[in-house]
Image: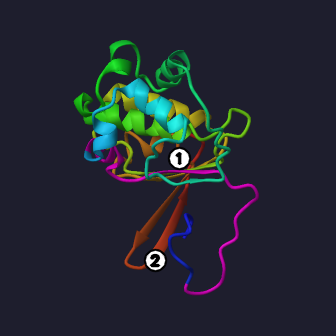
Amino acid sequence: LILGHLSPSDGEVRYPHPLRTVYFPQNAAMELVLKPDLADLDVTEVVQKVAAGEISVDGSLKGSSVEKGSMSELQARSHLGNFGLTKTLAHRRVASLSTGERTRLYLALLMIGFVKNKPPNLMILDEITDNLDVDTVDSLVSALSSFEGAVVAVSHERTYFLSRFASQEWQLQQGELAISVFDAPT
């Protein structure tokens, strides 16, 4: 419903204006190796091609202020550095990256679509911590804790991930929604 893939069976869905959404689907990192036009490129090339609008990833970007155009190698490497993809990783083939590295690359590619003064205000993350190492999860938690928008995260990692940044937990059990509110994470 949030992404507009389904219609409500009753009532209506209203969105705040402007809604700028990033959707990170479950197993998104696999998309990068299953698409031959992506898997054989080096990481920096992929960033440049996504920035130019030559190729796209399947994560939904609603309301993004995409500024199609060229991105220099230096700009692409700087962008990748924000996601922990530095030095030699920036020049490796996408297919040679670990699943955790591809997860970071996918998130970096999704964020290309937003100009700095109009970042997303809603992030929907479906099992984003799958295949991430401890340091990357720590970095992700830190980034989500300082994110000024709303985050809807689906995860089985309650203790090491969700409880470190979430202020509410919604659980659907036997057709009933249970909402728990937490103190602000520290």
Q: Position of residue 147 (x, y in %)?
A: 61, 38
Q: Looking at this view, is 9 or 89 the one in front?
A: 89
Which amino acid, mark 2?
Glu
Q: Looking at this view, is 81 or 32 the one in front?
A: 32
Q: Would you name the residue on which mark 2 appears? A: 176
Q: Is residue 129 visible?
A: yes
Q: Is residue 51 above or below residue 85?
A: below
Task: Farthest residue to the top: give it.
Answer: 87
Q: Quadrant of residue 117?
A: top right
Highlighted magenta segment, given as a residue range = 9-33
- Marks 2,1: beta carbons within 8 A: no
Task: Farthest residue to the right: give it.
Answer: 17
Q: Would you name the residue on which mark 1 appears? A: 166
**Residue at 65% across, 74% down:** 13
Q: CA distance from mark 2 to mark 1?
A: 20 Å
Q: Helix, strand, or loop for circle 1?
A: loop
Q: Is residue 14 above or below residue 164?
A: below
Q: Is residue 186 visible?
A: no
Which amino acid, mark 1?
Ala
Q: Looking at this view, is 59 or 124 the one in front?
A: 59
